[in-house]
Every structure is written in structure tokens, then in C-alpha cells.
Amino acid sequence: MGGMTTVVRDAVMAALGEVYDPELRLPITELGMVGDVVIGEAGDVIVHLLLTVAACPLRDVLQEMAREAVAGVAGVTSAEVVLGTMTDEQRAELSGKLRGGMTEAEIPFNLPGSPTRVFAVASGKGGVGKSTITANLAVALAAAGLEVGVVDADVYGFSIPRILGCDGEPMQVGEMIVPPVACGLKVISMGMLVSTGQPVVWRGPMLHKVLRQFLADVWWGDLDVLFLDLPPGTGDIPLSVAQLLPGAEILLVTTPQIAAAEVAERAGAMALKTQQRVAGVIENMSWLEQADGSRLEVFGAGGGAAVAANLSEVLGVEVPLLGQVPLDIAVREGGDSGQPVVLDASSSVGGVLREIASVVEGRIREK
């Protein structure tokens, strides 16, 4: 019977190796989450599954996935999964494995050979839809098969959790923070760390510190692209991004009106001093389509093209206008409900955002 037990054990472990942690996106066998596996002579199997923390919000999901995987193994007559919790030593070992041997001070996106393209989404002024653009581009790229992360770097005015419908909380594994997953994205935001309605009242050094923690202490895995949703203007956070992520490229969001375009231009010209590349300009709220098919240009026209042209001259390199996004109530509805409009295949404005995302995807895949 010993030889048969060995065969069943190998098959059970192989089946458990196909179970991926929904947040870490790695097999539970690689994460050290599989403890004792007890196999009875009648083919009954008991698996001890070790959670990182007892209050893991996905405990029931992991338990059922593991049970189904084991139950499907040939020769298994019954499968039971017993939940336990990792020891401090096991959590520390997992934390070290996730860090890949890096020290706490290192930001993975700056390491030689990093596969991640980093885009900082900026605007000159607030209210131009920067966070909405960030969320929709990120979701569209994730739907296209890329591994995508989003840092809500607007520490004072965070809105990414609402727009993405992300109500999960970050989980701590040793010294590392595991970000929640929403709409196929790994997401981190100050909105996940403060109570509802609580304001964040910090000076510049604290903002720099939290941004560094979001970049260095969060387990991002192997991302294809990381988006940072910046606060408007040229203040502390954009400067910290330039220091912490010198290779980050800027996506500039503006509306068509002259006042917004002029301010956006100044934000884009900051790249000349920080030696960052402006990847392109996106014009939001470009027009409102009327019932007869005509376009009502609520905020004027031409601002995005003017910003792209003027920045091309100032920076000495071509800064393209990546697209124009019309006003559409579906965008607001999607942001309020946590279902970004790009997820709606029938939405015309969602199609526009998907087209812009495909242009960005082409640039990512060129690397």
C-alpha cells in the first residue's frame, strides 16, 4: 500500500500546485501554504492549509479551491481541507521569497532588467477626470492580458478604490504588504488605510514616505505596467515620483478648455526639469454627443491638441495626442458603481478608452 500512497500523494501535491492564491497569484505550494497532507488507506485525504493570517478574507475561497482540486485526483474518495495559520517564521520566509532577496529599501521597478513600464498619470488642475482615465486604461490593459498595478498616489484626494469597486484591505505578510485585487488589477491606495471620511493631513516628507512604501513594500510581482494616479499640479508627490521612479513616463490628462490646457502644459513642462518623458496627452470631456448625432463642445475645443503641440516644441520631442474622450453619463455611472465603462463592450465611450489603451499597450510591448 506504501507505493500506492506515494502515487496518490504526488498527484495530490500536483493538484494543489494548480491552486493559485487570488491575491498573490502564485501556487499555494510555492507559497508554503500546504502543511501536512494525510492520506488514508481508503483514499480519504486531509490537507492542512496554512493561511498567512487567521482573518484572511479569502479563507473560504482558498479552502474550497483546494478541496475541489484534491477531490478531482484519481483514487481520492473524500477530500477535507483544514485551515491553519502560518507561524511568524513561516511568514518571514514567505516575505523573503516574495521580495526575491531584495532589501527593504529597493524599489523593484528601478532594478536593471525590470519588465515593468511605469506611467504617471498627471494633470495641471483637478476635475479633469485623471483618476477615471487611469482606472479605465488600467482595466482595459488587464483585460488585454497584461499584468497591471495601480498606485493611487493622490494621498489627499484618493478615489481609485471607489472607481474600481475595490473594498478589500491590504494584507501584511511579514514586512510586505499584499495589495487587494480588483478588476484584474493589483491596487494600493491611502483610501484602504484610513477610515471612511477621515482626512489625511500630512506635510511633504510624510507624503514621500508613504509613496516610497507603496512602491517598495508592496508585493507587486512581475507587472507589465504600473500606473500612478497623481494629484493635480506640480507639488510634492509629482516631485517624489520623479525622484523615486526616474524612469516613469508621464501621461497628461486635460480638458479642451484653454484654462485647463494652459495649466496642463505647465505640468507637462515639468518633465524638462525632471528629465522624464511625456508619453502623450489625453483630452477628456471633449464633447457631448446630441440626439441628432451632432457634438456639443461644452468645454470648448482644441485644448488637447494645443497641449501636445506646445509640449512637443518645449521638450524637443514629439508628444502625441493619444485620444479624445467624449462626455458620457456612462463614465460617471461606471465610476460610481465600481464597474469602469471599458468593461461594457456595448459602450461607445468605453470603445474610445479601449482604443487609447491599445495605443499605450503597443508602446508597452515595444519594450
Image (cartoon, helix red, strand yellow):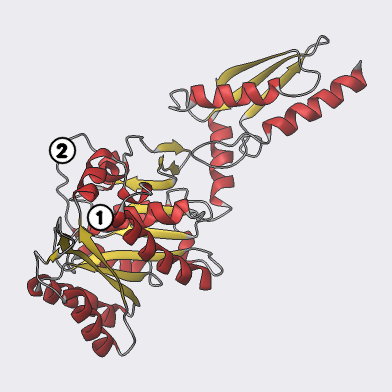
Query: Which residue is at 74% across, 33% downward?
Result: 14
Residue 202: x and y, percent?
17, 51
Residue 292: x and y, percent?
15, 59
Sort mark 1 into few (<14), some (14-19) or many (20+) by Cα contacts within 10 Å: many
> For the residue marked with disc 2, what is the amino acid?
Gln
> For the residue marked with disc 1, what is the amino acid?
Ser
Q: Nearer the viewer, residue 52 or 22?
A: 22
Residue 59: x and y, percent?
49, 24
Marks 1, 2: nearer the viewer: 1
Q: Against 70, is 103 above or below?
A: below
Query: Which residue is at 68% across, 31% downward?
Result: 16
For marks 1 and 2, give the CA distance.
Answer: 20 Å
Q: Mark 2 falls on what kind of element?
A: loop
Give the residue pinned by disc 2.
198
Work out whether residue 153 can be spotted: no
Which image quadrant: the N terminus? top right
Q: Which mark is residue 131?
A: 1
Q: Against 44, is 84 above or below?
A: below
Which tag, 1 or 2, sits closer to the chain's start? 1
